[in-house]
Image: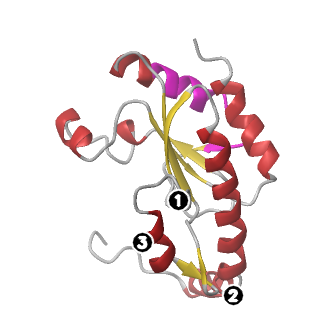
Amino acid sequence: MRSAGMTLSAFNAWVVLKGLETLSIRMQAQSANALALATWLEAQPGVARVYYPGLKSHPQHALAMRQQTLNGQGCGGAVVSFDVKGADAESARKNAFHVIDSTRVCSITANLGDTKTTVTHPSTTSHGRLTEVQRQAAGIGQGLIRVAVGLEYIDDLKADLARGLDSLK
């Protein structure tokens, strides 16, 4: 199970196959939402930096647009990460948790790939077993938030994150 994952039942395998039929259009919609959210996040005063290859400001934007195509068009994917501002690592961590805990639409979980938007704090979830030095070497700071963007109405997602970002001290 550790190497290859769980063995699916026949029904679950069928559900996965049915989901693959609409994967392309879901990825188009989720990628469009992710780009809109990333663009909006770049303009937020509480955000120090946004990481999304679909943004022209991303250092590897051109490469990502060549490699990540969907229906012949460059696509940034559905995952956006951003650093919230903080005077030091502890205040950045506190601010990140404030933003995450203020959400009502986003689901707080470390899962990826859902049609529902999820939000997580990588330093304490997916990268929690690494030392702080290892996390820093990988670019995972205490103020980093990862959003796997789903199919919700984009203005609802912006309002959900704004609730926390607008009330940062």
At label 2, the amino acid type is Glu
At label 1, the amino acid type is Leu
**Magenta highlight range:** 94-107
At label 3, the amino acid type is Leu
Name which of mark 2 and mark 1 comes first in the sequence. 2
Q: Position of residue 159 (x, y in %)?
A: 77, 36
Circle 3: element type: helix
Residue furthest top as drawn:
169
User: Which quarter shows the N terminus?
Assistant: bottom left
Q: Which residue is mark 3?
A: 63
- Marks 3 and 1, how far apart at CA: 23 Å
Front: mark 3 or 1: 3
Q: Which residue is mark 2?
A: 21
- Marks 2 and 3, how far apart at CA: 28 Å
Q: On the picture, is 104 further left or further right than 140? A: right
Circle 1: element type: loop
Q: Is residue 16 above or below residue 95?
A: below
**Residue 106: within the magenta?**
yes
Q: Between 125 and 32, which is closer to the camera in this rendering? A: 32
Q: Position of residue 37 (x, y in %)?
A: 67, 49
- Marks 2 and 1, how far apart at CA: 19 Å
Q: Position of residue 133 (x, y in %)?
A: 18, 36
Q: Which residue is mark 1?
A: 112
- Which residue is depicted at the point 40% across and 15% down? 87
